[in-house]
Image: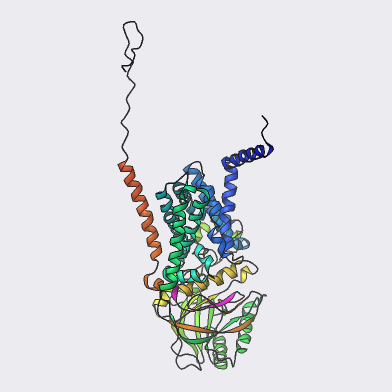
Amino acid sequence: MRIPVGLRVRQRWRGRSERLLESPRWRSGAAVVAGALPALAFPEPSLWWFAHVALLPWMLLVRTAPTWRRAAVEGWLGGMGFMVAMHHWLLPSLHVFLLVIGALLGLLWAPWGVLVRSMLGGTPSTARAAAAVAVIPSGWLMIELVRSWEGLGGPWGLLGASQWEVTPALRLASVGGVWLVSLLVLAVNTAGVLLVAVPAARTPALAGTVVCALAVTSAWIWAPQPKEAGRVRIAVVQPGVVNGMDSVERRFDRGEELTRQVRGSDVDLVVWGESSVGADLGRRPDLAVRLAELSRAVGAEVLVNVDARSEGTSGQAGIFKSSVLVGPSGVTGDRYDKMRLVPFGEYVPARAVLGWATSVGKAAGEDRLRGAAPVVMTMPADGQGGPGGLRLGPLVCFESAFPDMSRHLTRAGAQLLIAQSATSSFQGSWAPEQHASLAALRAAESGRPMVHATLTGVSAVYGAGGRQVGRWIGTDTSGAVVYDVPLADGTTLYVRYGDWPVYAALAVLVALGAAGATRSLRRPSRPAQGPAEPPVRTAHGSPARPVR
């Protein structure tokens, strides 16, 4: 009997598919590519909806890993793909060192790969499938927590941050920070794997999806939100790209020129970007005088950022990046020195060992120094115009990625959060948009408006709920834009209770470990088997038949 052509084609395709799935080389390449897919959910592509299904290919691959070791390898390779894709714009600066960093940080996902195979492999029971919707997101969150350490690059590319423009997600962030949003996105992906690959587990998968939807709805309805309490007019000055040997001086001149353009706009505060002043104002009194005159001309204080050698608030002498508030009478005395520095960009960790990185990329030739403590600045009440007593919470560049820093400033009384940044080295990449989007999460978490001011774009302003105020100032713009920013009173649950989703995720993993240990103890042990007894033989030498 001849086999129909269609059936032969399907059999051949199935055979090839099975051989591919058994090929370690193919699986390794697929893991790297699948791990890189979630990067598309972040700016600049900003396919926020894709985050809810982006992990499916990776998880579907890992759940079919033939061994635990293979699952760990595919977790590592996928993690490496994700880290390199999220930070690919660093390649011109770090060169091959980016691949080394990606490979090292990718190891954080090796245990997660084992966890995915353990919870989703084979045909999981209803109980195991239901547990997976909580366990797998919890494992991912532990990875995000560990890599959020400053020395490992900080919390750039947390999966929840991809939802920065989704209003329900911002409301969820006000309850549990970006961590809670990450948990939700992972839970939806896990439920998706169960729906696609495990028909028997579709009921718990659908139940998990419903629970996620109810969580978002509940946060939308009852989560307390700060209420509007007045307004403040903020001018953001973005000088744009300035090149040449005298670029520092010309950038100052351009910032000064643009600031004068907002004269008569009734602004309360002017914000310049990171490294907008290239000399210590104490050693260059001429610059301090020009800034004071500028403040008088526009009738508002000017918040600049000094990147220069000076004596910091900690008493050390060296290069600091400092937010400095200047009023009509000169420097007000309020100064904040950047505390969390960019690894390799602003200092080289263990320079005695890793100093060679400066020869293969644009790593810092000299380490910047750290500030001693966060600072809440108070605008003087006797300024020319402006809301006297307004409390500012300054952050510098990289620090806007850390949820705990903006939360601390809010608890210390900051009414307006300000991040001064410079992404000049990464023009034309995804970095400026990714950086500007982080301020939306910080505003939603803290219930305070946030200004993200840069030298070359993207600059942006967000209200207390994380929604954009006015327009972005793109990387192709040199100008000054005035924003009418609503202030807010009250507090969010995240400010009140902090990183509670992280502790909840840790509790889930501890419970999983305890359940596994209990099952091991309850499992009956097999009796030890001694050597086989010789068969009983009859008088004729043949083995005796067993008695039936």
The x, y position of residue 35, in whole percent, is: 56, 54
Q: Is residue 321 left or right of residue 2?
A: left
Question: Quarter of the image containing the N terminus?
Answer: top right
Task: Please give the range of residues in magenta.
Answer: 445-468
170 or 100, which lies in front?
170
Q: Position of residue 496 (x, y in %)?
A: 37, 73
Classify residue 446 by image quadrant.
bottom left
In percent of the image, x 34 and y 14: which residue is there? Answer: 545
Which quarter of the figure is the C terminus placed in?
top left
Q: Is residue 373 visible?
A: no
Identify the colour scheme used.
rainbow
Residue 108 percent coordinates (x, y): 48, 54
Which of 163/125 is in front?
A: 125
Vertical placement of residue 340 versus 448, above or below = above
Give how far across and how far down residue 226 sits, in percent. 43, 79
Q: Residue placed farthest to the top in the image?
A: 540
| In the rendered image, the vertical position of residue 104 relative to residue 328, given as above or below | above
Q: Is residue 92 magenta?
A: no
Which residue is depicted at the point 59% across and 52% down? 33
Viewer-nearest residue: 537 or 218: 218
Say whether residue 492 is visible: yes
Counting labels gives: 0
